Image (cartoon, rainbow, N blue to C red):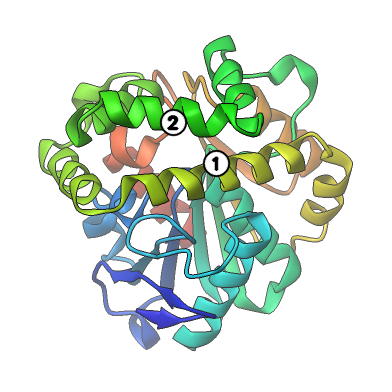
Amino acid sequence: MVDVGGPVHVADLGGPGGRDGPTIVCLHGLGGSHLNWLAVAPGLAELGRVVAVDLVGHGRTPAAGRLPDLAGHVAVVTGVLDALGAGPVMLVGNSMGGLVAALVASERPELVDRLVLVDPALPAAMPAIPHPRIVANFVACAVPGLGERFLAERRRRTTPEQSVRRVLRMCCSDPGRVDPAVVDAHVALTASIDRAAADTAYLASARSLTAALVRPATLRRSLGRIAAPTLLLHGERDVLVPVAVARQALRDHPDWTLEVAPGVGHVPMLEVPEWTVATITAFLAD
């Protein structure tokens, strides 16, 4: 645990770090946790020290009076990076965590040496809207009262295992690719936490993310200040954040690099960990 205005859970996933390699800090997406990086941790640990942060109200990090919104997540991550004292790091973020990573790189450039954004939730043009089912879910969550009732009913009707498998079906093109041991770890964590508190943090994060994405001009100005070399990884069949979002980001930032995983969904680090590690390794070598 690291104290950043309250406890923050930081998982050390291996690797030497220091003079023997970079520190690689991984940020999960909305509703995720440090476990989202288990499948790629052994490969990334060949490159340097790997740590994964549980954002506010997610995984084993309690809200503890802090707001689980984008600003709260950015503050926690910058606090963790300051506490690690490892110098500039390679910051890796998926989905909402990708946007958080980008904002950290924009606001505190001295903390980030390289940036890897995995299916990041970046501002997009209207043609890049997600699948209608995903839009409906976010609209329901955005309405005060309705979102709370929706998640409470879903929580009442699903076991931890059913909840994990529902998320994997939504996030993966082929959930069967995910290592069963990693699935079991997600189920065990979901069973051990306060699911009502986790849903409260999910709602606050989702609402903050939606509010930010509907003001794309503000986010684009922030992204324009990123100085770190940046790699975009994106699943071709992502239904939450369409690959068109990444392609638009590349047009906006032609100095970035984009690699697309064919036939893969929203979480390449879980669905195709070998491809994810190989692509990041090549980026680091460059």
Q: Residue at x 70, y 74 (%)?
A: 108
Type of residue at label 1? Leu
Task: Please provide percent x and percent y for residue 52.
Answer: 37, 63
Which sits earlier in the primary sequence, circle 2 or circle 1?
Answer: 2
The answer to whether one can see residue 272 in this image is no
Of residues 259 and 187, the one drawn nearer to the viewer in this rendering: 187
Q: Residue at x 74, y 69 (%)?
A: 107
Q: Nearer the viewer, residue 196 or 72?
A: 196
Q: Is residue 279 left or right of residue 215?
A: left
Asked if residue 23 shows in the view, the reply is yes
At label 2, which amino acid type do we have?
Leu
**Residue furthest toward the top?**
132
**Above or below: residue 174 compared with residue 108:** above
Would you call the spot at circle 2 few (<14 residues within 10 Å), some (14-19), or many (20 or more)? some
Q: Secondary structure at mark 2?
A: helix
Q: Is 40 located above or below residue 78 in the figure?
A: above
Above or below 266: residue 91: below
In front: 105, or 148? 148
Q: Are marks 2 and 1 in contact (CB under 8 Å)?
A: yes
Q: Residue tagged by mark 1?
A: 203
Gap in Å between the C-alphas at discs 2 and 1?
9 Å
- Front in this rendered view, residue 55 or 235: 55
Give me the residue at 62% from left, 70% from top.
Answer: 75
